[in-house]
Image: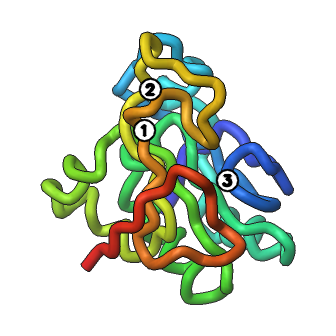
């Protein structure tokens, strides 16, 4: 299984708390006005990488947790679900995931929702340029929520979070 990847950032601190390996994927149909990654919109952008290749990269950095961003990982939900599942089975790493879909939209679609058991934190909702707020942590506009899906890991806490335990 492959994921279209634009970039991988190692030990970034901009994509969630602490050091993170951030996987930026290609493909987004939300096309948010003012998006800071419009080059990520093309569904066929970036390079194809196998789940095995990406897992090896994630595992090679023992200090960093993981971030899925983009683009929007939910447009490649099958492959990202496989990657997230393997990360959880083979490491102790936490996974943060950014999406332009809302949590409620994801829950309403069983195909999209299948990744939720493997994510620790979901940052949901489209960026709204008219509501842009540069003081927000890890978000661009206040409609976007930081949602803890499985508790609040001590090393992944951030102000302004919502605890939702997904069943």
Q: Specify whether residue 83 is in view.
A: yes
Of labels 1 and 2, earlier in sequence is 2
Label pair 3/2, CB-CB below 8 angstroms:
no
Q: Is residue 129 left or right of residue 78?
A: right
What residue does disc 2 label? 127
* On screen, residue 90 above or below 108: below
In the image, which disc is placed on residue 144?
Answer: 1
Q: CA distance from mark 1 to mark 2?
A: 7 Å
Label 1: few (<14), some (14–19) or many (≥20) C-alpha neighbours in 10 Å = many
Q: Is residue 124 left or right of residue 106?
A: right
| Percent of width and height locating residue 64 | 80, 67
| Percent of width and height locating residue 166 | 30, 73
Determine which quarter of the picture holds residue 143: top left
Q: Residue furthest bottom?
A: 89
Residue at 53% from the left image edge and 69% from the top image edge = 83
In the image, which disc is placed on residue 96?
Answer: none
Label pair 1/2, CB-CB below 8 angstroms:
yes
| Percent of width and height locating residue 132 | 52, 19
Identify the secondary structure beneath mark 2.
Answer: loop
Identify the secondary structure beneath mark 1.
Answer: loop
Q: Specify whether residue 37 is in view.
A: no
Number of numbered callouts drawn: 3
Residue at 60% from the left image edge and 35% from the top image edge = 136
| Percent of width and height locating residue 61 | 85, 71
In the image, which disc is placed on residue 16?
Answer: 3
């Amino acid at each position: 299984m492959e994921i279209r990847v634009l970039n991988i950032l190692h030990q970034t601190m901009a994509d969630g708390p602490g050091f993170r390996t951030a996987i930026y994927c290609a493909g987004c149909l939300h096309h948010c006005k003012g998006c800071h990654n419009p080059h990520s919109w093309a569904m066929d952008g970036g390079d194809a990488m196998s789940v095995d290749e990406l897992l090896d990269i994630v595992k090679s950095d023992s200090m960093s947790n993981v971030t899925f961003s983009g683009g929007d990982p939910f447009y490649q939900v099958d492959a990202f679900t496989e990657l997230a599942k393997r990360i959880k089975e083979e490491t102790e790493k936490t996974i943060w995931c950014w999406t332009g879909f809302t949590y409620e939209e994801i829950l309403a679609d069983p195909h999209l929702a299948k990744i939720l058991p493997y994510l620790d934190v979901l940052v949901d909702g489209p960026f709204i340029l008219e509501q842009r707020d540069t003081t927000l942590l890890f978000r661009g506009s206040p409609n976007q929520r930081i949602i803890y899906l499985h508790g609040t890991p001590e090393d992944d806490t951030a102000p302004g979070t919502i605890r939702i335990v997904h069943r």
